Image (cartoon, rainbow, N blue to C red):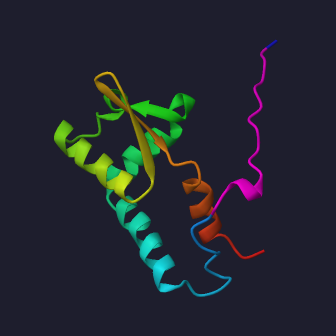
């Protein structure tokens, strides 16, 4: 009989969203700048694909060697990963000669919260 692993749920207090839901109140200028930077970084198809590859990779992290086949050269992949890091969407860790990327823990919840209807 197959076994099923259950993922733990995050408590709402453990996630610090960048902004309230858009339907709750207008964004402040600072919130709009932060949010626009995230969406601008994801507005490029290659970056969105890289972000998706990292987010969906087994174990929640991906070596650059595992995600570099997106139809552009390796230097271009590095450039796009750098832009995703600068926007606060990814974190990275160097291990030997490889860099491993993971989605910043609060990012997906924050983006989902921003686009959800207010409670």
Q: Where is residue 65 in the image (x, y as percent from the top left)?
A: 32, 27
Reply yes or no: does residue 3 show up in magenta: yes
Question: What residue is shown at x 59% (from left), y 54% (from top)?
Answer: 106
Left or right of 78, for residue 104:
right
Q: Which is nearer the eye, 73 or 11?
A: 11
Please tell me whether residue 28 is drawn above or below residue 82 in the rendered image.
below
Chief SS of the magenta region: loop
Q: Where is residue 82 in the image (x, y as percent from the top left)?
A: 30, 49
Furthest-right residue in this view: 1
Q: Tell me, yes or no, if residue 63 can be seen here.
A: yes
Quarter of the image that includes the N terminus: top right
Query: Which span of residues is magenta-colored?
Result: 2-16
Please tell me whether residue 108 is drawn above or below residue 30 in the rendered image.
above
Question: What residue is shown at x 45% (from left), y 54% (from top)?
Answer: 89
Q: Which image quarter: residue 113?
A: bottom right
Q: Tell me, yes or no, if residue 73 can be seen here.
A: no
Q: Position of residue 108 (x, y in %)?
A: 57, 54
Quarter of the image that includes the C terminus: bottom right
Reply yes or no: does residue 66 show up in magenta: no
Question: What residue is shown at x 58% (from left), y 87% (from top)?
Answer: 26
């Amino acid at each position: 009989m197959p076994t099923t692993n259950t993922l733990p749920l995050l408590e709402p207090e453990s996630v610090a969203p960048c902004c309230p839901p858009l339907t709750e109140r207008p964004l402040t200028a600072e919130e709009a700048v932060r949010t626009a930077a995230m969406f601008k970084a994801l507005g490029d198809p290659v970056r969105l694909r890289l972000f998706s590859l990292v987010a969906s990779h087994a174990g929640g992290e991906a070596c650059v060697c595992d995600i570099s086949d997106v139809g552009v050269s390796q230097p271009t992949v590095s450039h796009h990963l750098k832009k995703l890091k600068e926007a606060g969407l990814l974190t990275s860790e160097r291990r030997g000669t490889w860099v491993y990327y993971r989605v910043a823990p609060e990012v997906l919840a924050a983006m989902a919260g921003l686009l959800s209807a207010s409670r």
